[in-house]
Amino acid sequence: MIFYMAAKHLAQISSQLIKAGRKADEPVAILQKATFPEQVVLETTLGSCNEDLKRAGLTPPVLIVIGPVVSLREKLNWLDT
């Protein structure tokens, strides 16, 4: 599941997904400046992603990726190679 331009609504999105049955420990990646050399990736969980986003100071626009695909990040990390 991928959301774009949704940082403002992340608390509501994550809360509703958990209420709908998604696990709080489900992986989440939040990407700022995706595909650019200055890309920043925050890996977190559905239950703590909103607070982690605030703490990290990432600002919109960001991509929010939710689900098991986040675990493929290390294998597909073409930007840092």
Image: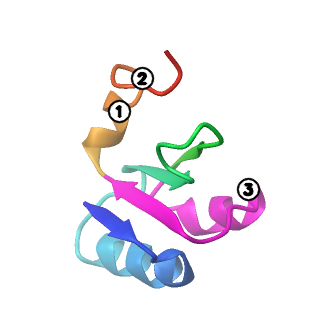
The residue carrying mark 1 is 71
| Amino acid on which disc 3 is placed | Ala
Q: Amino acid at mark 1?
A: Ser
Which of labels 1 and 2 is toward the front?
Answer: 2
Q: Quadrant of residue 60?
A: bottom right
Residue 71: % across, % down: 35, 32
* Percent position of residue 77, x then y: 42, 25
Relative to 23, is 21 on the left or the right?
Answer: left
* Residue beneath disc 2: 74
Helix or strand or loop: what does disc 2 sit on? loop
Q: Which residue is mark 3?
A: 56
Query: Real-space Cα distance between discs 1 and 2?
Result: 7 Å
- The residue nearer to you, when weighing 69 against 18, is 69
For mark 1, give the secondary structure. helix
Lower position in the chain sequence, tag 1 or tag 3: 3
N-term-proximal mark, 3 vs 2 = 3
Looking at the image, which residue sits at the far front? 36
Q: Are marks 1 and 2 in contact (CB under 8 Å)?
A: yes
At a point 36% along the width and 40% down the height, the residue shown is 70
The region drawn magenta spans: 45-66
